[in-house]
Image: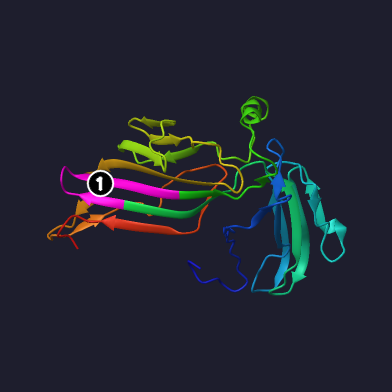
């Protein structure tokens, strides 16, 4: 605590944490135009090392279509209350430390589950011309429901006008630092022209469109790169021959559905003679 808690005093704390790879599609394969349903299992009780006098667990879904959920805890169906896109378990009184109770929900979420199985990120510092070069090599996997039949490009074209929601990855949006220059986007075949770079004094956004829509179970390896002015990342230490390089550990796509990373390799390549 910032200050010791006085006897009989109270302190409100807020804790945020994330679970990775905790969702799975059910059914595991769907038709190209069908909605996707995800399953999430968790404990209705807060996983606390302390005895809890009062608690409740609230789950907010992206929509109101929740066809299945555990009715309640301990046979008490009234302990689970659903209202629109929100599901509440509890309140529960006097829960012993370490108590857990597994419950399960299944809800509609027709969005891709973007997972980066491997990212190799190179940052090359050059004293020639004061340039810093970034290159990132991705292997992206969509962990959404697989297709139950072969991909139909005609149906895909029609679907974009009728129901744009899809489990496929259609585009990636990568915000770069203001002042970034000369971006490129390639895959194993070569340069990909379906990209757009918007740069001005307030933003530098790289918008990518994969060579094909990436459906559930599909992989997509590609690489991107760009340059920037080294002076915006490097500064000298006063009265010494040392420098401080300040670069982000991770940049990459920013998607509203989120992205998980499994393996990241970061390499900083210094000029010859530097240590």
**Horizontal side of residue 233 vs 103, given as left or right:** left
Residue 37 seen in the figure? no
Vertical placement of residue 151 versus 105, above or below? above
Residue 80 appears in the picture as rendered: yes
The answer to whether residue 5 is left or right of residue 181 is right
Residue 238 located within the stretch drawn in magenta:
no
The one of 5 and 128 positioned closer to us in this rendering: 128
Give percent across and percent down for residue 98.
68, 74
Our reading of the magenta stretch's main secondary structure is strand
Picture residue at 77% right of the left edge, 57% below the top: 89
Whether 83 is drawn above or below 192: the answer is below
The crowd level at tag 1 (other Cα within 10 Å; few <14, some 14-19, many 20+) is: many
Q: How is the image coloured?
A: rainbow
Residue 157 versus residue 214 in the image, above or below: above
* Nearest to the observer: residue 221 or residue 70: 221
Quadrant containing the C terminus in the rendered view: bottom left
Residue in front for this viewpoint, 23 or 58:
23
In the rendered image, which residue does mark 1 sit on? 132
Q: Tell me the residue at 83%/56% (across/down).
A: 71
Mark 1 falls on what kind of element? strand
Which residues are drawn in magenta?
123-138
The percent coordinates of residue 27 (x first, y second) are 74, 49
């Amino acid at each position: 605590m910032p200050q010791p808690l006085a006897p009989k005093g109270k302190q409100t704390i807020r804790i945020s944490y994330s679970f990775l790879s905790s969702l799975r599609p059910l059914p595991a394969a769907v038709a190209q135009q069908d909605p996707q349903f995800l399953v999430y299992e968790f404990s209705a009780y807060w996983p606390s090392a302390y005895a809890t006098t009062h608690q409740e667990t609230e789950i907010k879904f992206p929509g109101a279509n929740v066809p299945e959920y555990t009715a309640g805890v301990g046979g008490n169906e009234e302990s689970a209350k659903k209202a629109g896109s929100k599901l509440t378990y509890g309140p529960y009184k006097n829960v012993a430390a370490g108590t857990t109770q597994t419950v399960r929900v299944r809800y509609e979420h027709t969005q891709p589950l973007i997972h980066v199985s491997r990212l190799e990120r190179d940052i090359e510092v050059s004293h020639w011309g004061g340039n810093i070069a970034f290159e990132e090599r991705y292997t992206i996997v969509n962990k959404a429901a697989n297709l139950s039949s072969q991909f139909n490009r005609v149906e895909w074209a029609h679907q974009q006008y009728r129901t744009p929601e899809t489990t496929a990855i259609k585009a990636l949006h990568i915000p770069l630092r203001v002042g970034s220059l000369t971006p490129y986007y390639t895959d194993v075949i070569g340069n990909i022209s379906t990209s757009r770079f918007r740069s001005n004094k307030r933003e530098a956004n790289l918008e990518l469109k994969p060579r094909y829509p990436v459906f559930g179970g599909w992989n997509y390896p590609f690489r991107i790169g760009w340059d920037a002015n080294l002076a915006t990342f490097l500064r000298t230490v006063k009265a010494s021959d040392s420098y401080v390089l300040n670069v982000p550990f991770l940049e990459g796509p920013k998607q509203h559905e989120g992205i998980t990373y499994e393996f990241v390799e970061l390499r900083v390549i210094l000029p010859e003679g530097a240590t």
